[in-house]
Amino acid sequence: MSDLSALLVAAGAFPGSEKEMELYGQFVGTWDVLCTCDFGNARSRRIKGEWHFFWILGGRGIQDVLYEKDLPKDRFGTTIRCYYPAEHIWKLTWFQPGENEYVNMTGHKVGDDIVQTVTGDSNSVWRFTEIQKNSFLWYCEVFDNVCNCWKIVQKMECTRSNELQAVYTAGMGRSS
């Protein structure tokens, strides 16, 4: 039996697709996460976690694993992202079986942000913003019909960990 990681994980972007793959490829590596969840009614929670991004499928996709520190692995979540050049769009799927979550999305660049729109739900948007080489913010926004406005219900402050920082630059053909 082959080692699954050897079959799945790639060394970098598929040759010739580096420009398109950069949208999510810039996140390859390990990130420390400070997450704030706002459930309303003064029930906010701050959680520490990690977010690992890596190349997959011969460099034609990016997968991540996101988790709260000290939780068992059956509570981890993962997203698979693949770029479809004919449509000029990213297609994504988030899974977190331990929380009964399964979400299909499309992703695209809007200004300096990356906006992920939940398929079939115009009232929910996931956004990467304030993207720097070693930090970014991620938001989950939902539309509140009562106030007729968008509200942030989850915010993740992410900083690149030194642990795998070289993976990103090597995968994009850059020197660190």
Image: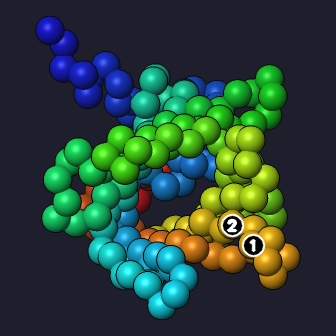
In the drawing, what numbered circle is on residue 142? Answer: 2
**Left or right placement of residue 173 versus residue 29 in this view:** right
Residue 107 visible in image: no
Indicate whether 2 appears above or below 122.
above
Say which element carries label 1: strand
Residue 74 visible in image: yes
- Mark in front: 2 vs 1: 1
The quadrant in which the N terminus is found is top left
Indicate whether 66 appears above or below 19.
below
The quadrant in which the C terminus is found is bottom left
Q: Nearer the viewer, residue 62 or 171?
A: 62
Q: In whole angstroms, how far apart are the C-alphas of marks 2 and 1?
A: 6 Å
Question: In the rendering, at what x and y percent does residue 128 appear?
Answer: 61, 64
Mark 1 neighbour class, 10 Å CA radius: few under 14, some 14 to 19, many 20 or more: few
| CB within 8 Å, label 2 to label 1 | yes
Quadrant of residue 106 in the image?
Answer: top right
Indicate whether 136 appears above or below 19.
below
Residue at (75%, 59%) from the top-left corner? 123
Question: Identity of the amino acid at label 2?
Answer: Val
Question: Identity of the amino acid at label 1?
Answer: Asp
Q: Nearer the viewer, residue 145 or 52?
A: 145
Residue at (52%, 87%) from the top-left corner? 41
Question: In the rendering, at what x and y percent does residue 5 appear?
Answer: 26, 28
Residue at (63%, 59%) from the top-left corner? 126
Say which element carries label 2: strand
In the drawing, what numbered circle is on residue 144? Answer: 1
